[in-house]
Amino acid sequence: MRFRGKVALITAAANGIGRATAAIMAREGATVIAIDNHRGRLDEAVPALRLGGGKVEGRLVDALDAAQVDAAVAEIERDHGGIDILVNAVGGSTVIDKPAARTEELTLADWQKLIAFNLDGTFLFTHAVIPGMRRRRAGKIVNLASIAGRGLSANSSSAYAAAKGGIVAFTRKLAHELGPDGINVNAIAPSVTLTERIRPHWEKRSQGSQAEEIERTPLRRVAEAVDQANVICFLASSDADFVTGITIDVTGGV
């Protein structure tokens, strides 16, 4: 019960890594505020998460809309007395038609869409929760970067790599800003993870391509969402009270 008495706001919580994280935190005592921008996914996810144990509330919020984000955070703080944990799980490479496009194939619209989707939501929710965490002189923020942000993924675009590299830098800088207020800021950098959004792209790859990906991974498999969620929960727990400013590669050894 690492999260008993804690309020955890998790973005993109209706599926993928966000949902897997919400399931663990709810089961371990947190009041989970599940944020998503898709009503259907949220309506399916929240009851399912509650069945797994714990308190879960769903909030329909567009993470790229500053007014919606600010209003949601204000309501959550009013209703629950504060937010102890923020997990910024919004992001991904598949919001453009060709996620692995070479730079010359990208349009400016592709570039801007990937940058906004991966950086803006993380900034907006972080910006909104900081004042409350500062007042309480406590908080845990965990961001989702990617090994693409370290230049290690051949199956994503330069725009995605730039955005996730930005998450790594943002995490490090923010840790220095907020550390004196007792707020920890960390990130994870996943390799290929078979979430609902990524699995169809994985299945379209040839058997040879899949085998190559698995072969170059020392643990000889690709990640599932729970592999990433387990590390997020470590960083969000008191076990990581003296850890801040780092990005942990969760890659099976790549």
Image (cartoon, grey):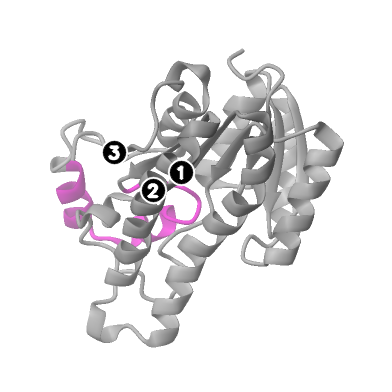
Cα distance in 3D space between marks 3 and 2 = 18 Å
Lower sequence index among marks 1 and 3: 1
The Cα–Cα distance between marks 2 and 1, rounded to whole angstroms, is 6 Å
- Tell me which amino acid carries mark 1: Glu
Q: Is residue 56 visible?
A: yes
Q: Is residue 223 magenta?
A: no
Question: Residue most toward the right?
Answer: 79
Q: Is 143 rendered above or below residue 236?
A: below
Where residue 31 appears, as percent x and y from the top left, is 73, 28
Q: Which residue is under mark 1?
A: 177
SS category of the residue bearing label 2: helix
The image quarter containing residue 23 is top right
Q: Which mark is residue 249?
A: 3
Cβ–Cβ under 8 Å for marks 3 and 2: no
Disc 3, SS: strand
Residue 173 circle label: 2
Task: Name the side, left or right, on which 57 lies relative to 222.
Answer: right
Magenta stretch, residue numbers = 192-214
Q: Quadrant of the N terminus?
A: top right
The quarter of the image holding the C terminus is top left
Q: Is residue 134 above or below residue 63?
A: above
Given residues 240 and 149, the one toward you in this image is: 240
- On screen, residue 121 versus residue 71, left or right, reads left
Q: Position of residue 92 (x, y in %)?
A: 44, 59
Give the overall secondary structure of the magenta segment.
Answer: helix
Could you tell me if the residues under marks 2 and 1 are in contact, i.e. CB atoms within 8 Å? Answer: yes
Residue 163's x, y, as percent? 37, 63
> The disc labelled 3 sits on which kind of residue?
Asp
Image point 68% across, 16% down: which residue?
Answer: 4
The residue positioned farthest toward the top in the image shown: 1
The residue that appears at 43% across and 70% down in the rendered structure is 114
Reading the chain from its start, which is encountered first: label 3 or label 2? 2
